[in-house]
Image (cartoon, grey):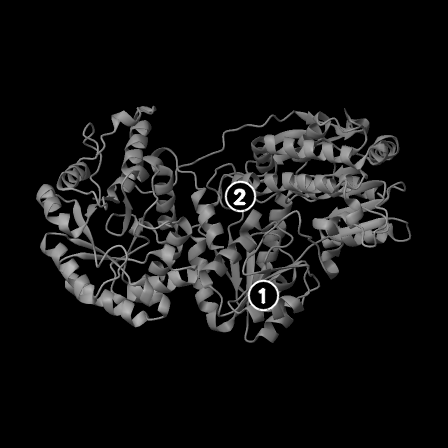
Amino acid sequence: MTVALAFDYAPAPETTRPHIRDEYGLFIDGRWTRAHNNRQFATVNPATEEFLASVAYASELDVDAAVKAARKGYEKYWSKLTPAARAKYLYRIARSITEKGRELAVLETMDGGKPIRESRDFDIPTAAAHFFYYAGWADKLRYASRNGADALPLGACGQIVPWNFPLLMAAWKLAPALACGNTVVLKPAETTSLTALALADIIAQADLPPGVVNIVTGPGETGRALVSHPDIDKIAFTGSTEVGKQIMRSVAGRDIRLTLELGGKAAHIVFADAPLDQAIEGIISGIYFNQGHVCCAGSRLLVEESIHDEVVARLLRRLQTMRLGDPLDKNTDIGAINSAEQLARIQELVASGVAQGAQLHSQPFSAPDRGYWFPASFFTGVTQSHRIAQEEIFGPVLSILTFRTPDEALSKANNTPYGLSAGVWTSSGSKNMWIAEHLRAGVVWCNTYNRFDPASPFGGYRESGFGREGGVHGLREYLQHA
Amino acid sequence: MLEARATALASRSIKTTTKRVGIDLAIACVDLTTLEGRDSAGRVRSLCIRAMHPDPSDATVPHVGAVCVYPNLVAVARETLGTSAVHLASVATAFPSGQAEMSVKLADTEQALAAGADEIDMVIDRGAFLEGNDRKVATEIEAIKELCHGRAHLKVILETGELGSYENIRRASDLALHAGADTIKTSTGKIGTNATLPTALLMCEAIRDFADRTGELRGLKVAGGVRTTKQALAYLVVVNETLGADWLTPDRFRIGASSLLDDLLMQRQKERSGRYAGNDYISKD
């Protein structure tokens, strides 16, 4: 018998609606306050361009108030607590994130455009996992310092997080800093403030002492005010290499700790002896996860020449099954591009690739009427001298290059100013070990990609930054003499 | 990544129309199976009647794909099924172990065919496969295929739970397809590890690559441990996204199961009435 109707997935939208206030203030000293002169900016849903909320625009004066609160919170409360008491608060936050997981996931997807499947299954659970993990460290810090020195906190820290994994990046930064006994002024990205502000509510409900976590929203200018504030003991920044360089210049000559997690242009190497279907899934996850808005995205695919055509054919076929559309639909694989500005940047780089003679292949795509969209795409015929092989696109666009020998693969992989991550696919264990050892990248994934765990350190080489987040390494960035 | 991909596919949310279509498709793809020592003529007869009319209260329910029984009960099943469109499958070749001389396996198969089976579910010789004797495995499949030629559809059971690695499962799939299997099947249902989603995905990849190379569309059967509608729909998603719509038909996809039909019918009633009527509203045998 034949089935009359096609087995075509009906829309399965997430129906939970999180509570979104009309306007959000700044979270300073345990209280919600208005920004100086009541300045505000709008945050929109990138999938619909609909207004979501007005968010406070923190000026230099507001940042100063936040830093003062953090200093007071450090001296008056947080440094006086026993480590086990700090852990108790962190566990409370972790549990609360887990309990509110669905609501936070929907909020993240509405504000940032990422598919609900990812915010629900990856962002939010991993954010909670970081709090759980570092809560456990709070009273064991002596084991984190290298020479058995007393593990002393730094003081008040400024933390600036990007828009690609808003709540998760906030968790990566807050959890180790708080576990070590520091207080924090956190600045979320301009386009994705809402989950950080929801986290402020969670922190308030967890009854953290005032000033231990302060959250100031605003554009780059707010971040600059935080970086140049004289009473900050440490800056931790995740974002673009360009801004990272500005920050490094501005902290030069000051007694201040700094960690930077910046851009990347990861090499993803596929040898002819790789399990191809597995490698294809790795490539797909590597570049199309979160619309390619991932600093460790495997955006430069290096394929052994003998299997180039087969890999391209398989990738092209796999692109046909990628589902682009409403990020709140549980079956969506590719959501909306985070902002109009980012979409323009992707389009500009893609146009340069076409102009320089590379061939563009995209999934079948008709853009919804509103919102910012870009289809899952890849370029063939790319060489090292193309801009699309050198510059970070930060979108769902892969550049495919070829190599003939392992040496050539390695030299092409390392021929980049970046060094955040890399991937290798081969059935040969010895080849895997050899290449992993010689790749200049903070993370090397062997026969897999995009695996994360709070216990595993993450960070880059060269223009991808310095310092590590995650694991015991992540604690040392927030301790003196460690 | 195989397991990660299978997990991602299992998280597809199948709702409304798609769910209704999927349930009917799954019913049409069921190989309603009874393979027990206590199987009797009466049991097989009632199974056949249920296969033709899964829900006596609702004529819109499709009949299942096939009934699957031991060779000695094929004659009883054929008598009950008559000329119905429900296929009649029989396990053969010393099911489930496959530990017998070739002459016995051939006789086993011939007996089932002569009694009226139009589908044969054979098992591969896992001992030979694990010894590296691929030639023996292929020769047996070829011999049974020759016997079935023009008379029956041949399903080759790999018994993936005994093969030890995904690499071996892929190799066995390729071997069986090249030796002439019309359908490759995961399991006998007689050991601890039955069909799993990653295994089905891997076998779909082998079938897809075989179709790419030869242009021939071969089938997949998952068997053992599929008890719920949710599981069945997940397999349909795997087939849909790996092989495509051409495979979403009982001719190329089957689910071997005994109790799955109960849940499919219950979910079907629920999709139509909005309520779960309960177990007693499903006729069982």
Judge left or right: residue B61 versus residue A72.
left
The first of marks 2 and 1 along the sequence is 2
Q: Secondary structure at mark 1?
A: loop
Chain to which the residue tagged by mark 2 belongs = A
Q: Estimate the x, y position of residue A187 in percent, counting from the top left.
A: 75, 39
Residue toward you, B216 or A6 = B216
Residue under pointer 1: A356
Identify which residue, A383 or A473, lies in the foreground. A473
**Residue beneath the point at 37% across and 65% down:** B171
Residue at 35% across / 44% down in the picture? B225
Q: For residue A238, which numbered disc appears in the image?
A: none
Q: Position of residue B247 (x, y in %)?
A: 30, 51
Q: Residue at x 30, y 48 (%)?
A: B248
SS label for mark 2: loop
Confirm whether circles 2 and 1 share one chain: yes
Question: How far apart are labels 2 and 1 at the CA level?
Answer: 28 Å
Q: Amino acid at mark 2?
A: Gly
Q: Chain of mark 1?
A: A
Residue placed at 45% from the left, 60% from the top?
Answer: A277
**Residue A301 at x, y percent in the picture:** 56, 63
Crowd tier of the residue under label 1, counting other residues whose Cα lies within 10 Å: few below 14, some 14–19, many 20 or above: some
- Would residue B106 appear left or right of A270 to someone viewing this image? left
Q: Name above or below for residue B173 compared with residue A325.
A: below
Asked if residue A15 shows in the view, the reply is yes
In this picture, residue B175 sits left or right of residue A312: left
- Tell me, yes or no, if residue A323 can be seen here: no
Mark 2 burial class by Cα count in 10 Å: few <14, some 14-19, many 20+: many
Look at the image and tell me in which quarter the C terminus of chain B lies.
top left
Of the residues tagged 2 and 1, which is closer to the observer?
2
Cβ–Cβ below 8 Å for labels 2 and 1?
no
Q: Nearer the viewer, residue A94 or B233?
A: A94
Q: Can you identify the residue that label 2 sits on?
A: A335
